[in-house]
Image: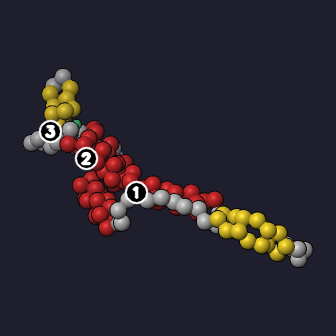
Amino acid sequence: MSTITEFLAEQKRLTAGATTGPWAHHETVHADNYVTAGGGILSGTHVCGPTYERANAAFIAAARSSVPRMIAALEAVMALHPNTSGECHTCSNEWGPLAWPCPTIRAIEAALIGGEG
Ligand SMILES: [Zn+2]
């Protein structure tokens, strides 16, 4: 199992390797003549690809800018919960700081790479 740091490093590597964003998804609209089942000709326009393909393309295009923002957000939260000699001084109870990884770090770890959370 990888660590959160390894997961984020891989996301950064993928982001750095991709072309600069923002990306956009553009529909391709064709003007065509269609031959109907009965042999007639219909003229009109259509958008290529099933709806799910267009939705996937829009998702991929949006990931170009959303993934770097999510990496930055996760790193900002993680910076608030550093491992300080085996304790998180942000998370504490009436007896003092909680052991690291604290519940916040464990929740991030569970969401990103699996685990008990
Ligand atoms: Zn914490």
Crowd tier of the residue under label 3, counting other residues whose Cα lies within 10 Å: few below 14, some 14–19, many 20 or above: some
Say whether residue 88 is visible: yes
CB-based contact (under 8 Å), mark 2 and mark 3: no
User: Which marked residue is nearer to the observer: mark 2 or mark 3?
Assistant: 2
Identify residue for label 2: 75
- What is the three-letter code of the residue carrying label 1? Pro
Question: Label 1: how many residues lie within 10 Å, few (<14), some (14-19) or many (20+)?
Answer: few
**Above or below, 100 relative to 24:** above
Q: Which residue is at the far bottom?
A: 39
Regarding mark 1 in the picture, which secondary structure is present there?
loop
Q: Position of residue 7 (x, y in %)?
A: 29, 58
Q: Quadrant of residue 51?
A: bottom right
26 to the left or right of 111: right
Three-letter amino acid code at disc 2? Glu
Residue at 28 percent across and 48 percent down: it is 72
Label 1 sits on residue: 22
What kind of residue is marked 3? Glu
**Front residue of this view, candidates 51 and 10:** 51
1 vs 3, front mark:
1
Which residue has dot 3 on it? 87
**Residue 44, position as x, y percentages in the image:** 76, 65
Quadrant hosting ligand 1: top left
The residue shown at (73%, 71%) is 32
Circle 1/circle 2 CB separation < 8 Å: no
The residue shown at (23%, 39%) is 102
Mark 1 or 2, nearer chain start: 1
Q: Position of residue 116 (x, y in %)?
A: 34, 46
Q: Is residue 114 visible?
A: no
**Residues at marks 1 and 2, CA–CA distance in whole angstroms:** 21 Å
